[in-house]
Image (tube, rainbow, N blue to C red):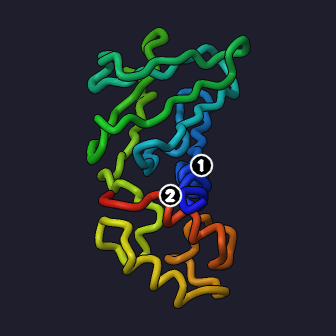
Amino acid sequence: MKYLPFLFAASFTVPTLADTVVIAQNGLDYFPREAQVEVGDTVRWEWSNGTHDVASGANCSEDGVFYGLLRNSSPVFEYVVEESLAGQTVEYHCTVGSHCNFGMIAYLIVGDVSVPCPGDVNGDQAVTFADVLELLGAWGSNEPDKDVDGNGVVDFNDLVGTLANWGPC
């Protein structure tokens, strides 16, 4: 029976922290022209008119990182930002006709990688007994830095999430 809490903790799933960033295509524009994204975020381009695409690469040249169509038959293209792009500004453009030369260019500004460490409530890059003590000290509160599962209250689920991530981050 002494292994049951650890088995339960190991099966706990901490919710993802990734976002979806929507970029609209309208005419020869992507909006917003510059989008702040993080590694793991989903970028979703949405078509509104014409025949277009989305191709990564600077100076109207494709670099092969991502490519997708935007047209009536495929009105949405999604791409999950890869860790290899952390800290970079990624230019993308439309390769249809001369659209890129007419200024159909935009940018993803990718933040630096900060590896999330659910359960590390004291920020020391390890989940240890010190984190459990801080979590227990905030029990029943709505302190967001100790609310591991993000449900608005520090409770049993947060304790389980902390135990499930025991060790160095």
**Dot 2 amino acid type:** Ala
Question: Can you say whether 56 is above or below 2 in the image?
Answer: above
Question: Is residue 15 visible in the rendered structure shown here?
Answer: no
Number of callouts in the render?
2
Residue 14 higher or lower than 155, as above or below: above
Number of residues whose C-alpha sits closer than 10 Å to that of mark 1, classed few (under 14), some (14–19) or many (20 or more): few
Q: Position of residue 46 (x, y in %)?
A: 65, 31
Which residue in the protein does label 2 denote?
164
Q: Residues within 10 Å of mark 2 (few under 14, many from 20)?
A: many
At mark 2, the secondary structure is helix
Q: Secondary structure at mark 1?
A: loop
Residue bearing mark 1: 11
Q: Indicate the amino acid at tag 1.
A: Ser
Badge 2 vs badge 1, beta-carbon distance below 8 Å: yes
The answer to whether any part of residue 124 appears in the image is yes
What is the spatial separation of the Cα atoms under label 2 and label 1, in whole angstroms?
A: 7 Å
In this view, the residue farthest toward the right is: 72
Q: Nearer the viewer, residue 165 or 116?
A: 165
Q: Residue at 38% across / 67% down in the picture?
A: 127
Residue 81 to residue 102: above or below: below
